[in-house]
């Protein structure tokens, strides 16, 4: 039986949602906050979630930015941090307010921001500029493939040349090497590069690294430009405009490049999709 698949915030979605929050919620004043309303054993909170209401009440939304796959929402004095499976949704009417949520910020104009959790998630509220979470610090300090600093030389330096086996999936989507690049976006990146997720990078030629670099930068840019992937949803619950080539939507369908069957396998704690005919194993 195949493993279940869960939504996780990755770069295209966090970037899309952060922009939508800034465009639609900027200036809204928080009336009250509820955290941990619906019990969920894999919803993790920074500090005492009972203090979130006191910290945020009366604060106005200033902006939101993405930090790799994380969403940072800033008020005048605080920062709300969402990552992993913490998916926010904007509710424009009281009738739309959900009964189940792990974080809920009601605004004084009768709209709200509700956060649900897919599988597992982290939610935190911090005094502005005081976040010491190691993943947050790592994401802030590293280049993303959308920045000028993400050169081929920088990308090449990320490869752990230890002579130990490192697969293509492990290289790109583990150790926080490229913040926001996870198992979800990985599939199309490797398909575009013509490399199987299980390919041993010790056998890679320089051309393979060049192809990977081009695919990482170009694929992620396209995903972001089109508002995220069609397998995920934005702040308003709408699917992204980027049509995934390799995902649960294309399983057992013909490969758009060579006509081979798209297959799935459990690998490194998640599912990988691949075309045996045109991806280098």
Image (cartoon, rainbow, N blue to C red):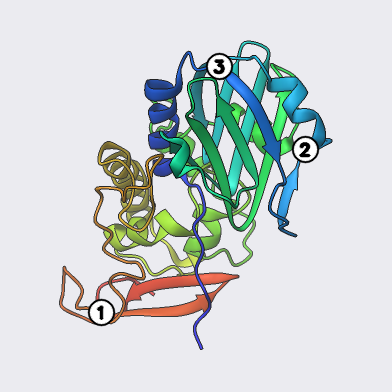
Tell me, for residue 29, which label it has, or none: 3
Classify residue 28 as left or right of residue 278. Answer: right
In the rendered view of the protein, which quadrant contains the C terminus? bottom left
Q: How far apart are the alpha carbons under marks 2 and 1?
A: 46 Å
Q: How many marks?
A: 3
For disc 2, the marked residue is 46
| 253 over 73 or under it: above or below | below
Helix, strand or loop at disc 2? loop
| In the image, farthest residue toward the top | 76
Q: Are marks 3 and 1 in contact (CB under 8 Å)?
A: no
Viewer-closest of 105 and 41: 105
Residue 44, given in percent of the width and then of the height, sits at 74, 48
Q: Residues within 10 Å of mark 1 (few under 14, many from 20)?
A: some
Q: Which residue is mark 1?
A: 277
Secondary structure of the residue carrying tag 1 is loop
Left or right: residue 253 versus residue 189 is left
Q: CA distance from mark 3 to mark 1?
A: 54 Å
**Labels 2 and 1: the sequence-earlier one:** 2
Say whether marks 2 and 3 touch (CB < 8 Å). no
- Sooner in the amino-acid sequence: mark 3 or mark 1: 3
Q: Position of residue 210 (x, y in %)?
A: 34, 48
């Amino acid at each position: 039986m195949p493993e279940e698949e869960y939504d996780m915030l990755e770069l295209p979605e966090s970037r899309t949602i952060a922009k939508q929050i800034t465009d639609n919620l900027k200036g809204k004043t928080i009336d009250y906050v509820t955290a941990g309303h619906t019990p969920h054993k894999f919803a993790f909170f920074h500090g005492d979630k009972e203090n979130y209401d006191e910290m945020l009440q009366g604060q106005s939304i200033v902006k939101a930015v993405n930090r790799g796959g994380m969403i940072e929402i800033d008020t005048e004095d605080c920062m709300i941090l969402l990552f992993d499976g913490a998916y926010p949704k904007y509710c424009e009417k009281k009738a739309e307010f959900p009964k189940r949520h792990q974080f809920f910020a009601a605004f004084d104009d009768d709209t709200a921001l509700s956060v649900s959790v897919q599988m597992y998630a982290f939610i935190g509220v911090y005094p502005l500029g005081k976040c010491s979470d190691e993943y947050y610090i790592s994401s802030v300090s590293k280049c993303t493939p959308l920045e000028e600093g993400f050169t081929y030389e920088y990308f090449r330096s990320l490869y752990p040349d230890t002579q130990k086996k490192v697969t293509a999936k492990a290289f790109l989507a583990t150790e926080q090497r490229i913040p926001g690049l996870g198992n979800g976006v990985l599939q199309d990146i490797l398909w575009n590069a013509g490399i199987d997720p299980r390919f041993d990078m010790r056998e890679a030629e320089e051309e393979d690294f060049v192809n990977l670099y081009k695919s990482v930068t170009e694929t992620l840019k396209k995903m972001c430009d089109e508002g995220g992937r069609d397998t995920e949803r934005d702040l308003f619950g709408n699917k992204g405009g980027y049509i995934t080539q390799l995902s649960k939507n294309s399983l057992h369908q013909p490969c758009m490049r060579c006509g081979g069957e798209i297959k799935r396998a459990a690998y490194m704690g998640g599912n990988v999709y691949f075309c045996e005919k045109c991806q280098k194993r």
